[in-house]
Image: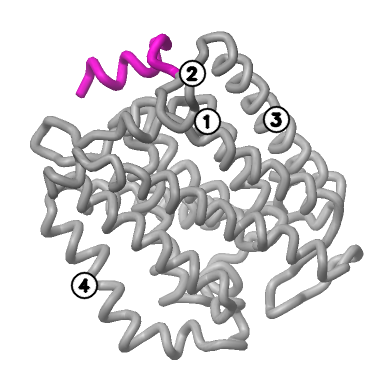
Amino acid sequence: MGILYEQTDIMGWAIWCAVLFGLMAFNELARSSKWFGLILLFVLPLILTITVWPTTAAPGNEYGTGNWFNWAKTYSALAGCLGFMAICYIPKLEKSKFALYFPPLILAFNILEAVFRDFQCFSYGAFDGEYINHLWVMSGSWNIMNGIAGLLNIATICGWLGIYASKGKRKDMMWPDMIWPWIIAYDLWNFAYTYNCIADHSFYCGLALLLSCTIPAFVIKKGMWLQHRAQTLGFWTMFIMTFPSFADRIAPVSTTHNPTMFFIVSFLSLTFNLGLAIYQFRKIKKNKLNPLKDELYKDTKAYQSVVSED
């Protein structure tokens, strides 16, 4: 903690755990049935959009929730959730080649939003660190490195034509080709993004939020990482748009503001994503695959375990 973040007490860790397990619980509730999903991911945000967010996320507010990025991230995450539900519950969409382009496109759009934000933070020229739009930002080479890592992460999205709805009582969107190398690459990139651009909120929107979808993807239901990610992200953005003071006043845990740590976090992100891109390129070339049509990891145990367990 003393390296990445300022020290926090047992109460701070208790709040962090509440965020982590709360997001996981709401994710499980949303995927438990179509109606719970619609209530939590459509009806609730619609009500909040009309009654609460115009005040709590008004432009220029003191917590930084009123900028374009928070609004775009909230609605793009919710659009992803509802689109994935449609693929699961409308049989024609599951079999539609064009509908299966939606998950990778909305995922790429979400990553691209954050890539743009990293480059934007570099353009501020806040090389000694300063508050911009009520958020602490330190510009540096790490923004460029992680922006490139995000573009590589988009380029390595693969196997979306293998997406299908699960066969059990719970209708989940399964993406068996999205296995652990890509998930780890994404997590490293996204954590670096939050550390770079929302530094003093990243204890929650970086560590806790990423673990809230990664843990279920490895422990609860394999093969549906993107649905876990979209729903936990949707719940987090809804929460922070409703209670914008949470990470600043109620339970603040700031980064150490150490330029070396910003560099290391983004360097790891870029290195892993570059390694994944090289590995996938070699795999495509060796097996003569078409990355726009073929699944790349059918020959792996990770892929086969997803298909066999569903």
Q: Give the mark nearest the N terminus, 1 or 2.
A: 1
223 displayed left or right of 29: right
Residue matched to label 1: 182
216 displayed left or right of 203: left
Looking at the rendered structure, the secondary structure element under dot 4 is helix
Q: Is residue 302 magenta?
A: yes
Give the alpha-carbon distance from disc 4 to disc 1, as whole Å: 32 Å
**Camera sees residue 254:** no
Looking at the rendered structure, the secondary structure element under dot 3 is helix
Give the alpha-carbon distance from disc 4 to disc 3, as whole Å: 40 Å
- The tag on residue 43 is 4
Q: Give the mark nearest the N terminus, 2 or 4.
A: 4
Q: Say which quarter of the image contains residue 47.
A: bottom left
- Amino acid type indicated by mark 1: Trp
Give the alpha-carbon distance from disc 2 to disc 4, as whole Å: 42 Å
Q: Give the mark nearest the N terminus, 2 or 3.
A: 3
- Amino acid type indicated by mark 4: Val
- Please name whichever residue, 84 or 247, is drawn nearer the observer in this view of the structure: 84
Cβ atoms under marks 4 and 1 closer than 8 Å: no
Q: Give the mark nearest the N terminus, 4 or 1.
A: 4
Crowding around mark 4 (Cα neighbors within 10 Å: few <14, some 14 to 19, many 20+) is few
Give the alpha-carbon distance from disc 1 to disc 3, as whole Å: 11 Å
Cβ atoms under marks 2 and 3 closer than 8 Å: no
Q: Position of residue 45 (x, y in %)?
A: 30, 73
- Amino acid type indicated by mark 3: Leu
- The tag on residue 274 is 3
For the point 40% across and 68% down, the residue is 75
The magenta-colored residue range is 297-310
Cβ atoms under marks 2 and 4 closer than 8 Å: no
**Camera sees residue 161:** yes
